[in-house]
Structures are given as structure tokens and as C-alpha cells.
Amino acid sequence: MAESTLARWKLLGLRPLRLGLRLMWDAAPGWTVVQVVLLVVQGLIPLAALYLTKLIVDAVLAGVGAAAGAGGAMRLVDALLAALGNAQPDALGRVLLLIAAAGAVAALGIAIRTATTLVGEVQSLRLTDRMHDVLHAKSVAVDLEYYERPSFHDSLHRAQAEAPYRPARIVHEMAQVAQNGISLLAIIGLLFSFHWSLPLILFAAALPGMAVKVRFSRQIYNWALRQTAANRKSRYLNQILTSRAFAKEVRLFDLGELFMERFRDLRTQVREEKLGIVRRRSLMELAAQLVAVAAVFGSFAFIAVRALAGTITVGDMVMYFGAFQRAQDFFRDALGGLAGLYEDNMFLADLDMFLALSPRLREPAAPVPLPRAMRHGITIENVSFTYPGSHAEVLSDINFEIRAGEHVALVGENGSGKTTLVKLLCRLYDPTAGTIRIDGIDLRDLSIRELRRYIGIIFQDYARYDLTVRDNIWMGDVALPQISERIMEAARRTGADAVIAALPRGYDTLLGREFGEGAELSIGQWQKVALARAFLRDSPILVLDEPTAALDPRAEAEVFERFHEQARARTAVLISHRLSTVKMADRIFVLQNGRIVEAGDHAELVGRGGTYAELFEMQAKHYR
């Protein structure tokens, strides 16, 4: 997998890095312009500092008679001193003026660095937030089927794991490369003016370090790619050990040491492999740095010989040697930044591929509008379905019709395809074969968002939001005001109003123990709140998929009686294992192994003595 991903990265080239630049610009365009200006100024400051150092050394030596002080730069200094009122410039005046100028340049450098750090921090924070926005938008946009693929979770894990810190690194490394690149170009020009060989020696000395960084950046990336599944598993084990969802069983079954050991084993495997890479990298970096040291002092000898021969002044020698050292530092830092950007480019390749995921459920080019009230009903014709990545057919040649305003029930054993059929109705998936229509309109010709607003639904694995009670119900229709009488009406329909009345702050009570002093509800109480959320949406179709599984029989009967009363004008689809609760449905469809094997009302199906009658009898005998 690592090799194939790397091959894909090579094909992408610098496109991911362009993605990073675009994200940076989108997140903070004004700050990006400010940073470019600051980087140009900061990149030129080292050259000015070196030249002033040379002038100071030459001025000092000229003052003690060790060297001639004349020259264009010194004449400019003398002219400046004269303008300041010193008619006969002396050595001390020259030296002090030059030192003052060097101090001003140093102070400017400090101010620019401080401003650059501030701007970089603003950019990285904004870019991090922008990155989360992009990840969240894509995570919401992709189809439900992606969440059932391990490869999607690997990709999402890498993107989420890197997003909090990688943008700051990208900003820092781009700034580092730009600043060091500008400084390097300026100083290389200075070195070239001394001798053409110095820039070549500088480049040759930096090559081993660059090769080491690039090589091990690739190895670290491939290691991270290989360890994605292990890292996700270790995160899951950590969740088992630390989250409330598993806390009771971990203690009751004494599972703590077991999961701690598994976590340690995984982390040890991950750690040891990375340490091996880091040890090899350290040895090769040491060798590369020794080559660089040899280049520095060899060049120093060359410059010193020229100074002894009188070809250059002592100030020149100090300047050129300082320039070579600084250039090497700039080269090393620029290459380090490029190596980091190489690694960032691989991360951004992952992000680019994640963002390239496209929904399989296609929006129609010209969506057909849905009628405000359903007139005819829902038609399911020759529908078959197989989950992506599977070969087992979950639904096979399903045919039936639900008339407008009719209440129907889907019953059958686990795995018979009931919930899958509901998912197809909500267009969380498209059928592998066949068609589903509402009032004769193919679901694929409807706007997905409008279709889902047309259906109020609650699944058995409903969400429990650690928000207020009001928010938990309001999530059913966020187009409503948060303060709405309809929220309380929905709670009354399901009996949740009695639960809410007993809470300390009523509808404004925070639920769950995740944040603050929240109130914890029983499973049955949570279910009533979730049902209210489904009832809130004033939609023509209402679907309840095992909505009352956690309620006792009396509470369940009350919910269904209220439901049938409140949903009298709506089309309703019920799924329940308790057959006593579906007796009042207008028609009941019995699914078995992905096929409809029986259909009719309760009395008809019991009279036939088939699958439904057998299931009903199995449940009814426990109440006799």
C-alpha cells in the first residue's frame, strides 16, 4: 500500500503543495501578503549585517594604522559624519557610526523576526481552522458507504491526525525556505564576487545533508502510512480504557490489564520501528555534517591565504568567512525546510486524495420538485441491493407499494433487510437494481436534501447529543426557531414532556456527562427524546426503525398509540421486533432473507398460519 500511495504521490507532483498554498491564501490572504514583505526584508538583513561588520573591522584597523581606510564605503561614512557636524571625521567617529548602524540593523532584524513570528502564528491558526472546515465539509459530503470502508477510515485518520499541527509546520517551513532562500541568494552573490568556486563548494557540501533529509522524510512517511491501522487500533484501545461507554464492562469483567497490555504491545511495535529509522538517520546526518565542517574550514583557509597575500583586507576576510558560514547555515535551513515541505507534500497528497473523494449518489442536473403533500404513495419496483465491497445480496427483487396516508410495518428476523430498505428509501444508498418512486418520481430525480426533508426518521442507533434537551429535539428540524412551541408539542407526542418536567432546568437542561453538570437519562428516556426529534419534522413520510426497543411494553404501547393518532395524515413505515406493536398497522410486510414472503394486515397474516403467525405465536406465548 505504501508503494502504491507513493507512486500516486509522484504522479501528483507538486499539486498537493499548490493545494497547501491555496489553503493558506484562502485562510488569510492579507496576512500572507504581509508575511511575504517581511520575509524579503528579513532575508536581506544578514547581508547588510555582514557588510557593516567588514566596515567596522576595516575602520578599526585603519584607526590603529594597520590598514588603509579609504574606499567608497568609508567616504560615504565620512560624508555622513560631516553632515552630522563633524567637519574632520576621525577613526572613532567612523567606528561609532558604523556600530550604531549595525545595532540599528540588528534591532530591525529583531523587530522583523518578532513580526514574522506573530504573522506566522496568525496564519497557522487560521489555516488549522480552515483545514478542519475542509475536512468536516468533505466528511459530511461523502456517502454513508464510505464510513463502512476501512480504507476511508485510514485516510480520514491520517488527515485528522495531521490537521492540528501540520498547517503550522507548512507555514513555518514555507517562511523558512523563502527567508533563507532570499538571504542565500544575496550572500551567494557576495561569495561569487570573491571567487566563483565558493558557491560551488557551498552547494557540494550541502548535498549530502539534503539527500539524507529527503531519503528519511520518505521513509518516515512510508512508516506512518504502514502504521495507520495500528495507530487507529491503539486509539480505539485507548478509548476502551478511558471512555464512559466501556467503563462498566472494563471493571466488571476485569478487562483493564488485558487492554492495557494490547495497547502497550501495539505502541511498542510502532515505537521500535520508528526508532530504527531515527537511529539510521542520525548516523547519516552526522556523516553529512562532518563533510560540511570540512568545507567550512577549507574555505576559511583559502580566504585567509588571500588576506595574507594582501589581495583582500582583514575586514573582507571576516566578511567572506562569515558569509560562507552564514550561507551554509542558510543552505542547511533552506534544505531542511524543503525536506520538510517534501514530507508536507506527501501529507498534502493524502489530503488531496481524501478531498478528491466524490459522492456516488449523484444530484440530478434538474431536480424534479416534490409535491407538498404526497398524493399517490411510494412504489418499490424490482429492488435488489448489495452493500459496496460485499458479494452477499441483502435485498432481492423487492416489489410493493405504500399508499399515501397508509401505515405499514416491516417485520422479520435480524438481517432480513428491513433497515436496508429504509436506507434506500432515504437515499443513503441507491439500489443495485430496480427503482423506488414517490408519487411516480424516481428518487434519483429528486434533490437529495429535499428528499430527506420529506422524511422524518429515527433509527434504533439514534444519536445522543450532549447538548440541551431543547437542542436534542430541535435537531429534527433546524429550520425552526430554537424557541418554538412545536418542540414542546413533539415532546408531548412521545411522552418525553414528563421526563423533561423532572429535569432541573427543563428544556434547557444539559444532557450527558461529557460537559459540565449534565443530567444523564435512562435508555428509555433518551429514546423518548429521540422520538420527539423525529416527530418534530413536519414531513409527509415518517419512519420509525425499532424506535421503542428500550421501552417497557406499556410505554411502547402508549408511544405507538400516540404515533398512530398524530401521524394520521402522514404515510408511516414502522419496523419492530415486537409484533404486538404493529397489529394496528394497515398492512404488514414480512421479510425473510431479503425477500418479501408475506403481506397483509394482522388478522390476515395470523389466519394464514405462515411465517408471521409463527413469529407472533412465539412472542405471544410468553405473555399468557
Image (tube, rainbow, N blue to C red):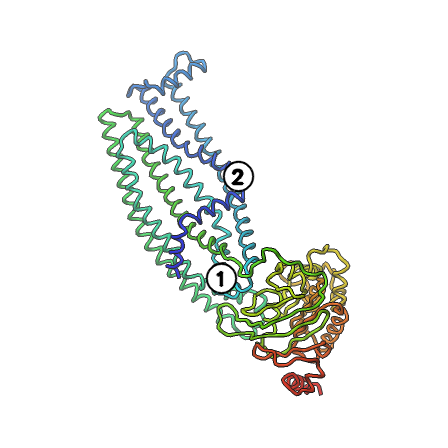
Q: Is residue 406 left or right of residue 331?
A: right
**What x and y, as percent, mark residue 364?**
59, 58
Q: Which residue is mark 2?
A: 31
Q: Amino acid at mark 2?
A: Trp
Report how far apart the C-alphas of labels 1 and 2 lie in the structure. 34 Å
In the image, residue 456 above or below residue 417: above
Of residues 590 and 524, which is closer to you in this image?
A: 590
Residue 524 against residue 96 in the figure, above or below: below
Quadrant in which residue 292 is drawn: top left
Across and down, in percent, residue 288 comes to 29, 47
Residue 586 in the figure: left or right of residue 188: right
Which residue is outermost to the top?
87
- Who is closer to the viewer here, 435 or 492? 435
Tell me what residue is drawn at x 51 percent, y 42 percent.
25
Q: Tell me which amino acid carries mark 1.
A: Phe
**Does the residue at mark 1 contact the one at mark 2 (Cβ under 8 Å)?**
no
Q: Is residue 24 above or below residue 99?
A: below
Taking the spot 53% from the left edge, 65% from the top edge, the residue there is 145
How dense is the environment of label 1, judged by Cα within 10 Å: few (below 14), some, or many (20 and up)? some
- Tag 2's secondary structure? helix
Which residue is the site of mark 1? 152
